[in-house]
Image: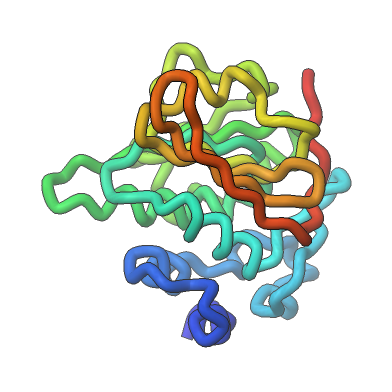
Amino acid sequence: MINPFVSDLIKQGILKTPEIIDAFKHIDRADFVLPENRDNAYIDTPLFIGEGQTISQPLTVAFMIELLQPKPGDKIFEIGFGSGWQTAILAQIVSQDKNQNLGKIFAVERIPKIFRFGRKNIRKYNFIKSGIVKTIGGDATLGLKRHALFDRIIAAASGEKIPAAWLLELKIGGRLVAPIKNSIWLYIKKSQKDFEKKEFPGFVFVPLVNG
């Protein structure tokens, strides 16, 4: 069975949504780690991928994606795609629309070496060639004006606050999941200026870097 930690995350109540569970089963975490870490790919822990970055702990990825609640056909802005594992999980979910509206992931990574590593990994699942994933190198803190608006926005690195551009580029009714310091925050956009906000403390992330 691919990703044996999936059953544990279901038992813990972290993974709950059928489409998300199916994506976690379909996308093999071992395809997104460094060769020397393949034996550790199914352990519920972050793993080093170079340049001070990690592939996140499965529990954390599962928790954040469950908060995000991506749907088939969604257009998603992902900040800091790193190893590409979360990107591929999201791509698997958004591409399952019965009406052939495949959805789209706009995945941004600012560290060139990590960008190349993650893009190579995502290519193993044909999401880039099929047009479901668009990888972008650079700083995502100013948003992606040409591609807005988004159904969902998710970030993998922690900042002091949510950048204003992300809030502007989220559709009304959309969900944003991102770390602020050592907490994961869920923002649900109720109107142009109003957001429902929920904090989930007790996590550790690499820092969000501008520029």
Viewer-proximal residue, 25 or 65?
A: 65
View extreme (top): residue: 146
- Above or below: residue 144 compared with residue 2: above
Taking the image as shown, residue 201 lies to the left or right of residue 27, namely right
| Residue 185 percent across, percent down from the top left | 63, 46
The image quarter in which residue 146 lies: top left
How many labels were placed on the picture? 0
| Residue 73 percent across, percent down from the top left | 27, 43
- Above or below: residue 147 compared with residue 34: above
Is residue 124 visible in the rendered image? The answer is no
Viewer-proximal residue, 165 or 108?
A: 165
**Image point (79%, 69%), residue name:** 36
| Residue 66 percent across, percent down from the top left | 48, 60
- Above or below: residue 196 compared with residue 70: above
Is residue 163 visible in the rendered image? The answer is yes
**Image point (37%, 68%), residue name:** 17
| Residue 130 percent across, percent down from the top left | 33, 41
Colour setup of the view: rainbow
Viewer-proximal residue, 199 or 103?
A: 199
**Image point (60%, 32%), residue name:** 108
Q: Quadrant of the C terminus?
A: top right
- Above or below: residue 107 compared with residue 62: above
Taking the image as shown, residue 1 lies to the left or right of residue 208, namely left
